[in-house]
Structures are given as C-alpha cells and as structure tokens.
Image (cartoon, rainbow, N blue to C red):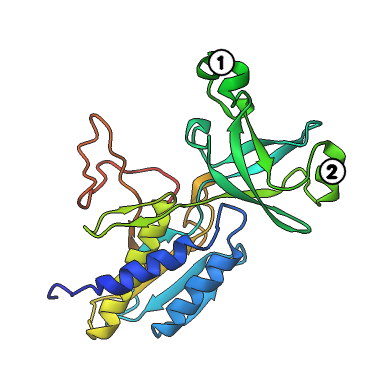
Amino acid sequence: MTRLAIDTGYLARTLKDLLEIPSPTGYTDTVVRHVSRELKALGLDVELTRRGAIRAIRPGKRPEGARAIVTHVDTLGAQVKAVKPNGRLELVSIGHWSARFAEGARVTVYSRKGGYRGTILPLKASGHTFNDEVDSLPVGWQYVELRVDALARSQGELERLGIEIGDIVAIDPQPEFLDNGYIVSRHLDNKAGVALALATLKAMQDQNAITPVDIHFLFTIAEEVGVGASSVVSHDVASMIAVDNGTSAPGQNSSEFGVTVGMADQTGPF
C-alpha cells in the first residue's frame, strides 16, 4: 500500500480539542464521548465496553488476522486524599508521576457541587516566610497541597463547597502550538497518540485505503493505572500496535523527533 498523506491541520485541531478535555483516569466519560463522535464522523461504527473503552473496526479484505491499533484517552492526575483543617487539600497521584512536576500546576478539582480552580503548592511555598527551608523541603505528594480558589479557611468551609475525599483533580495541560511546528503540553501522553490514530483513520478514509485485514481502532481508559486493552481485544485480532509516548533518557536510544519502536516490549499497561 502506498504511503498515505496525513492531514496535519486536522491532526493539530484534533489534538487541541483533546487537550481541552480533562480526562484523568476515572474521569474519562467526556473524552470517550468526544472520540466516539469523531469516529462516527469518520464513518465507523463505535462499540463501548462495559468499562467504557472504545472499539471501532475499519473493514479490510477479511476479518481474520485483524490488526489492532491501541491508544489511551486517560491521563495522569490527582485525587483528594484528605480535607485539611487549614482549608487546603492533601492529594494522592493518579498514575505514577512525581510531585516535583505538580508544584505550581493550575488545576480543577471536581466536587459534587461543580468544579473549583486551584493551585498545587509545596507545604512551604513562601520564601518570605520559610527562607532557605523552601529549598530543603523533600519532594513527594505528602509535601504538597491544593489551595482552592474559593473561600476555604477550614475543613468545614471546604466541605460546604462540596469537596470531599476522593474528588478528582485534573491538571491543566497548558498547551503551546509554536509557529515552528513544535508542540509543548502536559498530557501529550497520550492525547497525541489518540490524535495520531484519528488522523491516520481520516487519511485511510479520505484516500479509500484497502487493507488486507480489518483494522481495530481501540481507545482504552485506564492505562495510567495499569489497565490496558486486554478486555477490548477480540479473538479476530492477530497483532496489535500500541501508540504511546517514547521516553527520552540515557540508554533509551529513543528520539523526541521521530517514531521509536519498543524493543523486547513483552509487558506493559497496553
């Protein structure tokens, strides 16, 4: 099959739309509906699993030996662990990520009365007050707290806002689409992968691509906590390609400017 031309304008617009939808693991209904609508607009029938993952099949010459392309719509996030007497919130991470990268983040906490904006701050955030102790504070989720942008000076005032233990906290992506084509944002893991899958499907549809076997487009909802596509893959699937971020670190032999194929990738959350 000849190489397909990708509509990069559609790709960028799709990524922007996805980044605007908060979707930490456990809070994915809105993004699932969005992706489902897009798949239907591209001409595929959509099936949702009991858990809420998406399966959409593009027919090929035969269903047997199908290939699956899997991405995940959920992102890292946080959750309220404790409602503190000082009117702040103790947090626990959703997914595995360091509190080092949460410090200073703008967020939305979703309570039963609606969403509230706020900022994740170190316990000792003020240099005017704590001086050098600001720099010696350890890194960890027990050393940060969420300051809600509302009148909340006590546990009781937080509870009157409807905020409770277990409430989901979504981290702002703060996307930048630069003129040179560079894209910087939180949650490119894996909103970028979802956008790529949709742009690939659009190219196949626009150019009437014929594949030897059916292509199963799968979108999972809990990769960040280790739940992958095992419950979504049907018996017809013979091979699966997982599209996700390729980490850049010493010894990884990976690239931020191209596709990295995982070697000996026998296990993982996909």
**Residue at x 53%, y 66% (from the top left corner):** 31
Which of labels 2 and 1 is toward the front?
Answer: 1
Q: Report if the CB atoms under discs 2 and 1 are less than 8 Å apart.
A: no
- Which residue, given by chain and number where applicable, does mark 1 sit on? 131
**Residue at x 46%, y 82% (from the top left corner):** 40
- Which residue, given by chain and number where applicable, does mark 2 sit on? 157
Q: Earlier in the sequence, mark 2 or mark 1?
A: 1
User: At label 1, which amino acid type do we have?
Assistant: Asn
Percent across and percent down for residue 137 are 55, 18
Percent across and percent down for residue 129 are 63, 19
User: At label 2, which amino acid type do we have?
Assistant: Glu
**Residue at x 39%, y 64% (from the top left corner):** 15
Instruction: Establish if 196 lies above or below 142.
Output: below
Q: How many marks?
A: 2
Horizontally, residue 115 falls left or right of residue 20, namely right
| CA–CA distance in space, label 2 to label 1 | 30 Å
Q: 10 Å neighbourhood of mark 2: few (<14), some, or many (≥20)? A: some
**Residue at x 32%, y 69% (from the top left corner):** 11
Secondary structure category for the residue under label 1: loop
Q: Would residue 249 be visible to someone looking at this image?
A: yes
Instruction: Establish if 256 lies above or below 92.
Output: below
Instruction: Establish if 29 lies above or below 121.
Output: below
